[in-house]
Image: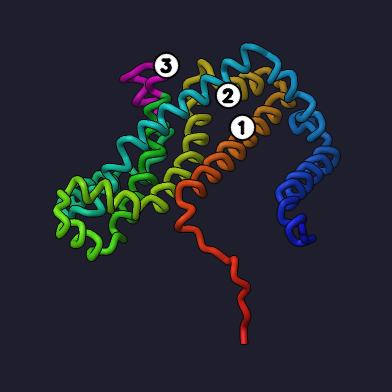
Amino acid sequence: MITVRAMLSKAAPLLAVAGLLGIWQVASLILNTDSFPSALEAIRAIPAILSDRGDLINILASLRRMAIGLSLAVILAIPLGLMMGRSRAVASFFNPLLMVIYPVPKAALMPVIMLWLGVGDVSKTLVIFLGVSLPIIYHSFQGAKAVEEKMLWSGAAMGMSAAQRMVRIVLPSALPEILTGCRTGLVLALITMVTSEMIARQSGAGNILFNALDMAQYDTVFAMIIIIGAMGIILDAAFEKLRRALVKWSEPRFDIPLSFA
């Protein structure tokens, strides 16, 4: 039986979105300026964008860059983070490099990368890769560092090599933390993707947004903001569902009612 609390919990995101749109609508009516269209005007512009073949190609190009950049980060950053977590020598070598790179806004690297690689997909994908890699490395490092030494000693006693212990003990134990980093990286991939397309404006969702801004098509600008936000919500929800399936064993269970004296 579905309780009122469960219904409210499921409806909470929709209520939050409805409240935000309501505030937006009222604010636009109060300000009454062309540069700030109402929520209804922005929503009405969405079907025109999604039904336009050129705009759809641009949006798919953005998603392709995100997918490639995130995939490369997962392939390279997870092993590096795990090795840093289990080897003091590897951590000592890479920590100073990461400390230098981490505070630099990745979009600030875009002009330099454009000089080297041009303004095509390669430069934008590289910026996404750089922005996504650091949180994945950090969470992989923390996950590997937290693995109990007794488990590794037991693996060694059973005849496992260092590589086998890394794959069969460290990786599964660190997986919940790794997936947390990947989820953070997914959000950063979307942010970095749009930012890179704002700077190197050839194609993509960021290109649509800023072309509309140049032509004072403010309803299209805000419609693209809604579309990009919806992309982020959908991707995050899909990844969270995957994460829960992969690390279901690590999720806390509250099947047994608790009583407090």
Quick check: marks 1 and 2 in contact, CB under 8 Å?
yes
Residue 121 magenta: yes
Residue 215 magenta: no
Q: Does 31 sit above or below residue 180? A: above
Q: Quadrant of residue 151?
A: bottom left
Q: Residue at x 48, y 39 (%)?
A: 186
Q: Residue at x 75, y 33 (%)?
A: 36
* First to last magenta residue range: 109-123
Extreme residue in the front direction: 158
Q: Position of residue 127 (x, y in %)?
A: 40, 30
Q: Does 132 sit above or below residue 86? A: above
Image quadrant holding the N terminus, namely: bottom right
The amino acid pointed to by label 2 is: Ala
Q: Give the labeled residue for mark 1.
A: 228
Residue 120 got which mark?
3
Q: Give the labeled residue for mark 2.
A: 205
Label 2 element class: helix
181 sits left or right of 214 in the view: left
Label 3 element class: loop
N-terminal-most mark, 2 or 3? 3
Give the crowd class for mark 3: few <14, some 14-19, many >=20 residues within 10 Å. Answer: some
N-terminal-most mark, 1 or 2? 2
Q: Position of residue 206 (x, y in %)?
A: 56, 25
